[in-house]
Image (cartoon, rainbow, N blue to C red):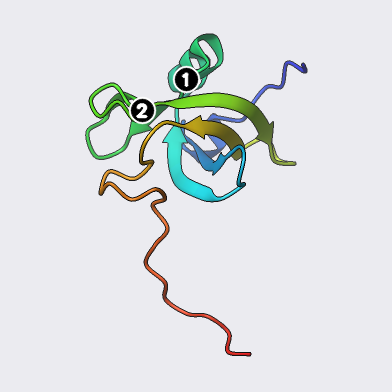
Amino acid sequence: MADVRLDFQKQGGLIPAIILDHSSKEVLMLAYLNEEAYQLTRSSGQMWYWSRSRQELWHKGATSGHYQTVRKITADCDLDTLLIEVDQTGAACHTGAKSCFFNQIWQEQA
């Protein structure tokens, strides 16, 4: 496993992370990690995020029981965005939906 140096400073200390279900590859959510959340995620094997609204660390599942266990972390070519595959326990979305992406806006007609 490579020791990659992510560029947290490029975007004001936060890196966006696209979270995928490891089995289905469905996009579950998009969230942000600061360097501390990233280190906690790496050391614990569970997802930690930085809450932009509450301005605090957030351990996914700590209050809901809907934990995300990390299976794979990949960085993009610029080292400023993450793609993280997880085993999701329960719902990923705070609304109770499996995925945060359920508001369809447009779809090409065949």
Question: In x, y percent, where is residue 44?
Answer: 49, 11
Tell me the residue at 51%/15% (across/down): 39
Q: Amino acid at mark 2?
A: Lys
Q: Is residue 110 above or below residue 31?
A: below
Tell me the residue at 39%/62% (across/down): 102
In the rendered image, the quadrant that contains the N terminus is top right
Q: Nearer the viewer, residue 17 or 26?
A: 26
Please tell me which of labels 1 and 2 falls first in the chain.
Answer: 1
Image label count = 2
Q: Nearer the viewer, residue 88 or 20?
A: 88
Mark 1 secondary-structure assignment? loop
Q: Is residue 52 above or below residue 100?
A: above
> Do callouts 1 and 2 mark residues in contact (Cβ within 8 Å)?
yes
From this viewpoint, which residue is outermost toward the top?
43
Q: Residues within 10 Å of mark 2 (few under 14, many from 20)?
A: some
Question: In x, y percent, where is residue 52?
Answer: 31, 38
Q: Decide if residue 101 is on the left or right side of residue 85.
A: left
Q: Decide if residue 15 is on the left or right side of residue 25.
A: left
Quarter of the figure with residue 67: top left
Q: Amino acid at mark 1?
A: Gln
Q: Residues within 10 Å of mark 1 (few under 14, many from 20)?
A: some
Look at mark 2 in the image and give the residue it sits on: 60
Tell me the residue at 36%/27% (across/down): 60
In the rendered image, the quadrant that contains the C terminus is bottom right
Residue 93 image label: none
